[in-house]
Amino acid sequence: MLNEDDRERISRGFSVYEHEWRFLAGYLGEPFLIDSCLVYWDGRTLNICALPLNGDDTVLGRSDLERIAARFAEVHEVELVHVWGSIAVPDALTVGNSVLGLTDQASVDSSFDGEHTIDLDDFSLGKLPEAAKSLRGVRNKGLTIAVKRVDQFAGSYYRIIEYWRQMHNIGAMASCAAATLPSYCRESHVVVVEASDQGRPCGFVVVAQPKADRAVRVLSFSLRSKGGRVGDALMFATIDYCMNAGVRTLHCGYAGSDSLSRFKEKWGARSTGPGYRQAMFATDPGWRARANEYRFYWAHRMMRQSMPSQSETITPNETGIAGIARQSVA
């Protein structure tokens, strides 16, 4: 686990979206700092963020990954290893007395060409005509914005997440991440940027400021309303809040689609690296199957009996993310 020195070191070396460990720990496991890399362990699966602190461009290979995994194999059997970031993907890992082979989903040369960040020192709508045009559209739609600290996750947020889950067919990873938000949003460095239409919330962004001059656009959800302007309203409000808070770099994460890249770039985000690959290693057929479906996370294993299938009709007040998250708060 992380001690105070580790937390201070992470804060000083924070350089990419994936270093926001408080959020990731909510569904990946207990965080550790090993060889300048954040690692998450849940007693059975090991998740390695191969993006060293301080923007170190080191590419981790087999010996690096095995050295990290060996720290945990001394006490417990490591049944699955999930790695993402700057890696040279090997065919297998030897962890303790086991050889973990690459799973079918394991070597993903992602379309993610680097994390997208916005340099707020250089941000100006005058340089971004498409963003300025979108903002005029937002103002014509009558949307209102509020930035707030959240002690109790609103029921309307659950419904927005549930809508988003169904519309975008998000998988186990995103579902687990969303279910951690009620507790994560209570962190002192986190705010929620909320968009409302006639007094009813229609979208929100979770924004974290883990370092004085850096902020992270952790997750964003919205209803399909007002001609798609909710996303633009939330992005501008997030930028405005961060600039007023003294933030110089806004981390917007990777973009897994061309449309998401275009949206972020419209608002001044640029792909700043590092590159991104991921790999999963397992021996047992059951773990290999979980890896192929991204259903190996601790949070998913704990919740899967309650998780409805994508084909089911969801009643947000009873099941799905809304129900699961509500149970986690109760």
Image (cartoon, helix red, strand yellow):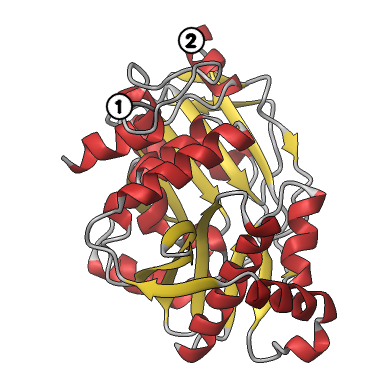
Q: Where does label 2 land, which residue?
A: 286
Q: Residue at x 68, y 32 (%)?
A: 90
Q: Position of residue 298 (x, y in %)?
A: 36, 31
Of label 2 and label 1, which has the lower sequence position? 1
| Identity of the residue furthest to the left in this view | 330
Q: Is residue 26 above or below residue 241?
A: above
Closer to the eye: label 2 or 1:
2
Q: Is residue 217 above or below residue 102?
A: below
Q: Where does label 1 land, which residue?
A: 76
Mark 2 lies on a secondary structure that is: helix
Closer to us: 66 or 246: 246
The amino acid sitting under disc 1 is: His
Q: Position of residue 177 (x, y in %)?
A: 44, 43
Q: Is residue 188 left or right of residue 83?
A: left
How far is disc 2 from disc 1 in space, using C-alphas? 18 Å
The amino acid sitting under disc 2 is: Gly
- Asked which quadrant contains residue 201, the reply is bottom left
Q: Quadrant of the C terminus?
A: top left
